[in-house]
Amino acid sequence: MFKKYVLSLMVISCFFIFIRIFPVDAFKNINCNNEDWTVCASDSQKSQWIEYAKDWKFIKQKGDISLYKRVLPSSGVIQVKAERIIQAPLEVVEQIIRDIPAYPQLMHNCLEGREIKRFTDEDIVILNVTKMPWPLKPRDVVVRTNVVKDWDFGRIEIALRGLYSPESEQWVPLIEEHIRMYELTAYFIGHILDRNKLKCIYIVHADPSGVPDFAINFLIANYPYYTLLNLEKMTKLEKYINLGRQSKYLQQIESFIALKKKFKH
């Protein structure tokens, strides 16, 4: 009787180890013939990913960058999305986005990126300063980051969300020569297509305070467009290639690539 009990425990333990090593979602992907495995996710899963929102409307194609927009019920300012295929591994792009002081090289019209408080590698309070057309003062915003990883589908999302008053001022007091803004959400999203090939998506919605909505809507598509152009240039820098080799996500990235290769053949 005791032997049967021990054997039963062993079988149950092996079952749970099996489930942990091979998550249920991973088995949903094995029939995916698309280069981008997020395409094969369920509608329920896609509904949690902002890039798959059903109300995106195509604006135009600029070179190899596709631009989209959508209207948010709570704002007169549109949300914009830019998509581009970049020939670079995810870990290199990840390190670029982690380099907060280099945001002026990455983000269009960014004057400063400053780390204020690091809770973890994935939860950081940042001050971001954006240049405005003359004679407007620069806008600054205090954001907090969040990282969502869906390794079963080769997807990572880094979100930056503006903090509202008074929390914003608790982290960074108002700066006299700037105007503080609070309405900002931005997403850097990567879909792993191959070991050195990534679908990069940048989504932004921002209300810079004191600027008419029509003027913001006219110019805002420039921000994700030029940011993706800058991102592609930065992936060639030796600094980020070397930092990518130290990424804490390397094991998950390699495992996902191995799984894709396994089911490709």
Image (cartoon, rainbow, N blue to C red):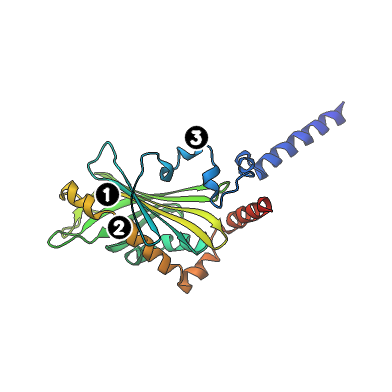
- Report the side of 124 relative to 216 (left or right): right
Give the distance between the C-alpha atoms of the residues marked 1 and 2, in whole angstroms.
10 Å
Kindly identify the residue that appears in the image at 46 percent across and 55 percent down: 121
The residue type indicated by label 2 comes to Tyr
Kindly identify the residue that appears in the image at 60 percent across and 48 percent down: 33
Q: Where is mark 3, residue-wise?
A: 44
Sequence-wise, the earlier of marks 1 and 2 is: 1
Residue 114 visible in rendering: no
Callouts 1 and 3 close, C-beta under 8 Å: no
The residue type indicated by label 1 comes to Ala
Give the distance between the C-alpha atoms of the residues marked 2 and 3, in whole angstroms.
30 Å
- Report the side of 136 relative to 80 (left or right): left
- Report the side of 16 relative to 157 (left or right): right
Q: Residue 61 in the image: state x and y as whole percent.
A: 35, 56
List the single residue furthest toward the left.
Answer: 135
Sequence-wise, the earlier of marks 1 and 3 is: 3
Q: Residue 185 in the image: state x and y as whole percent.
A: 33, 47
Element at badge 3?
A: helix
Callouts 2 and 3 close, C-beta under 8 Å: no
Kindly identify the residue that appears in the image at 43 percent across and 63 percent down: 96
Element at badge 1?
A: strand
**Rendered position, 30 above or below 196:** above
Density class for disc 2 (Cα within 10 Å; few <14, some 14-19, many ≥20) is: some
Q: Nearer the viewer, mark 1 or mark 2?
A: 2
Q: Where is mark 1, residue-wise?
A: 206
Give the distance between the C-alpha atoms of the residues marked 1 and 3, in whole angstroms.
27 Å
Callouts 1 and 2 close, C-beta under 8 Å: yes
Instruction: Give the label on residue 223, or none.
Output: 2
